[in-house]
Amino acid sequence: MSTSAPYPLQLELHADRNITQWRPLVQWLLAIPHLLIAWALRTLRQVLTLISFFAVLFTTQIPRPLFDAIVMTYRYEWRAMSYAFFMHEDYPPFDFDLSCDDDGVEPHTSLCLTYPEYLERWKPLYKWFLAIPQYVVLAALCIAACVGIVIGFLAVLVTGEYPEGIRAFLVSVYRYALRVEAYVGFLTDGYPPFSLDA
């Protein structure tokens, strides 16, 4: 029995499920500075992804500094979103470490992506097409995640505890979405699994 290698993009959340009951009412507001920066970084990522498209076509790889910058934008966004959706209470750092490995500055969230030494030259031309089934699945998962966020919101308000299954589901959906983005965004040639497992 062979074990498959883990997917190149790994995303985790390790935080206490006990959340102060008033937090869901204001935490999204406290997250606004981070969300604005994450939005700006997303815009930057789109430009860097365009550059990556040509880099892969001409050289079959993405320059490491470019790759690290793109991964940093995903990591920053994950930290901002996990805080905005009150998955933990600690305010995320304004950290812009250019590395594909998580720097561990934020103890509750981690995101890392393995740098590919080689990418197939012509895949950027058709990866978006291969990802269509993934987007269909992702659309259904996002609808379920919206319901999960509402249930989590109400549960924390009433009990002061984030339901373990719902939070794990939301983290899994976010991980799934980022794996699809990494595949379509030329960061890996590994087709994302149709799975919510880590």
Image (cartoon, grey):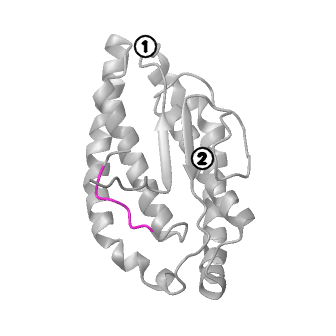
Looking at the picture, which amino acid does disc 2 mark?
A: Arg
Answer left or right for 133 relative to 118.
left
Whether residue 65 is visible: yes
Q: Is residue 87 magenta?
A: no
| Residue 22 left/right relative to 119 | left
What's the magenta region?
190-195
Look at 39% across and 67% down and name the residue there: 191
Within 10 Å of the Cα at label 2, are there few (<14), some (14-19), or many (20+) other Cα atoms? many
In what element is the residue under mark 2? Answer: helix
Q: Say which of 14 and 73 sits in front.
A: 14
Q: Quadrant of residue 46?
A: bottom right
State how far apart marks 1 and 2 are (Cα).
27 Å
**Residue, x 71% and y 65% (percent of image)?**
64
Is there any visible trace of residue 149 in the rendered image? no
Asked if the stretch drawn in magenta spans residue 191, the answer is yes
Measured from the top left, where is residue 77 in percent x and y? 57, 46
Q: Is residue 64 above or below residue 148?
A: below
- Asked whether 151 or 15 is in front, the reply is 15
Residue at x 65%, y 35% (from the top left corner)? 104
Farthest residue, direction front: 1
Q: Position of residue 190 (x, y in %)?
A: 43, 67
On residue 75, which mark appears? Answer: 2
Where residue 198 appears, as percent x and y from the top left, is 38, 44
Q: Is residue 158 above or below residue 113?
A: above
Numbered tag placed on residue 21 in the rendering = 1
| Residue type marked 1 | Gln
Q: Residue at x 65, y 88 (%)?
A: 58
Residue 3, how many percent across, how many down? Answer: 34, 52
- Quarter holding residue 91: top right
